[in-house]
Image (cartoon, rainbow, N blue to C red):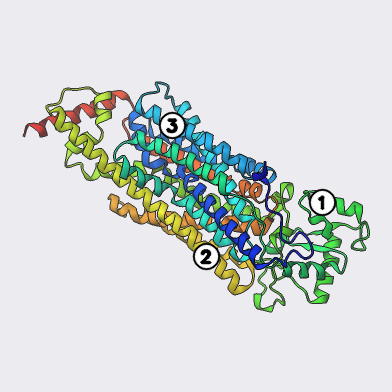
Amino acid sequence: MALTQPFPSPHAHGASHHLPPEERKRLLRRKIISLAGSVCVALSAGSNYAFSSFAPQLQESLHLTSTQINLVGIAGNAGVYLSSPLWGRFIDKRGPQTALIVAAVLVPIGYAGLSLSYTGDWSLHSTGLLFCLNLLTGLGNSGGFTAAMNAQAKSWGGSRRGTATALVLSGFGLSASFYSSLSHLLFPGNTGDYLLLLAFGSMTSMLIGLGLIKIIPPTEAAGEREQTDTSRTSSGYLRHRTSSDIGARATIWQQPEALSAEATDDESDTHDRLHPHANGAAESSRNTAVAASSDEIEATGNIDPESQGLLSGRDESKRTSRADIDPSQIDISGRRLFQQVDFYLIFFVMTLVSGAGLLLINNVGTITKTLWDYNHRDNPVLVAADNADLLFKRAPVDIAVSASDFETLKRDAKAAVQHLQAQQVSAISLCNFSGRIIIGLLSDLLVNKTASAANRVWLLIVVTTLALASQLLAAFPGAISTVDDLFAVSTLTGLAYGTLFGVCPTLVFEWFGMKHFSQNYGFVSLSPVVAGNVFNLLFGRIYDSHVPPSDTSMLSVLSVLSVVVMGEALK
């Protein structure tokens, strides 16, 4: 398909950087259109973060325990994160269009199935089926988001890449707020229609992205790259900046001809066979080659500013050069990726921060409802109305309240709770959105000021500080006793989560290269599955341990509650 072919690279030949101004403007306009399409896709691809805004209603309607509803939520997370490496590899090879088509099919099927299960129109609504339906939404959203990110990461130069990817990431973070707010405006208290809105809205966004998104290689600084390549190839080799340049310990040497789009993970071995005397030591070990090449670089005074590693303690001001090598010249993937210290560093940080974030994102609806019931314990009529589905379906008793009055109470209570849930989801989502935008702009500003992309990694300190603050506040005894108190935790968690996913994709791109970016980021994105799922299951177990363990106990509790309701109504 023509749509799957990227625009020809403007620096693919010697005079390509002499593009006329009109052509540059045309390419820039097309990039902006493609960026808008990616943001549109991301705005729906993050809809799994809205799970907590309808999870309590789904749990109540289908009589699920907290552990069961958390398993359903985990399915969405697993679909997003576990499929990322597979989607990444597929999109790196085939382009973004096919992934968007698949996403436009899977996501509506998942949300429409959840809607039918909630409304009772579909009698099959076991936990396993709900798990599979939410898994489909995660798989589809992962494909759409990976396609959107891949196109923008490969379309913008280093000076604008952080901002462009931050815009896409911010759309992903804003998705939950967008859909929960739109649903509250259009269908207040109607969870079934909310799920249908997610289905058709997601399909529309993916189809819009299908028509707009294209990969357009960057034109910025093409001349500078060619001059750099010319000077470095004069000695017979071209140095690829790998992850070792910013902390790891592997270095790859290749001829310029190996930089074609068809290069593979085994290109250094191919070079050794084709050019046995390229570095004068074809039969020597890799360590000998690295040492010899390092001596040669130091002799000429041309030291890569990142070649000593971020943690080496060397004063940045003492380095003689700050010129970064373009990520298109880096290619670390496959086995080499898992040999990099930097990979485990970013994986560990994402595991801890995203795990805490996903716990709140998936359960803030349940927490909000629990706090609301707790704060209205002096008004048992409202509490009974909010739990009316459980009251009448699990403990059918005759209470002395007129059907119309109780139906009004039920509708008002549920609308109030759902409104508060939407506010919490919006707070997380808006801060998630803001964090991604701010960290993207801040990272580009930092790189421009210091002239070294290596300094972008220090922004992880901002991320971890926000995450630590949110957890300390949530754990402090007595700090969270009302829904309003919960806003502080939601805000800090949203900022931490947003800044994390705002800076990490750019780090992966610059550390491990452009060619296999989607696949590499997919492996890094497996990290939320580890801690996120553990934390969510722990939450479900702990929450269920404070709920009456048997239906008999539940019947007793609800019977007592119904008597209280009857007494209140007779006053």
Amino acid marked by disc 3? Ala
Tag 2 near tag 1, CB within 8 Å: no
Q: Nearer the viewer, residue 388 or 154?
A: 154
Q: Residue at x 65, y 78 (%)?
A: 317
Q: Which residue is mark 3?
A: 112
For residue 475, say whether it is visible: no
Q: Which residue is mark 2?
A: 441
Graded by Cα atoms within 10 Å as few (under 14), some (14 to 19) or many (20 or more), the crowding at tag 3 reads many
Residue 134, x across and y down, in percent: 48, 34
Q: Residue at x 40, y 27 (%)?
A: 117
Q: Residue at x 53, y 62 (%)?
A: 440
Q: Nearer the viewer, residue 145 or 363?
A: 145
Indicate the secondary structure of the residue bearing disc 2: helix
For the residues carrying marks 1 and 3, which lies nearer the camera in this image? 3
Nearer-N-terminus badge (2/1): 1
Marks 3 and 2, Cα distance to the nearest angstrom? 37 Å
State whether residue 313 is above or below residue 501. below
Residue furthest out toward the front: 22
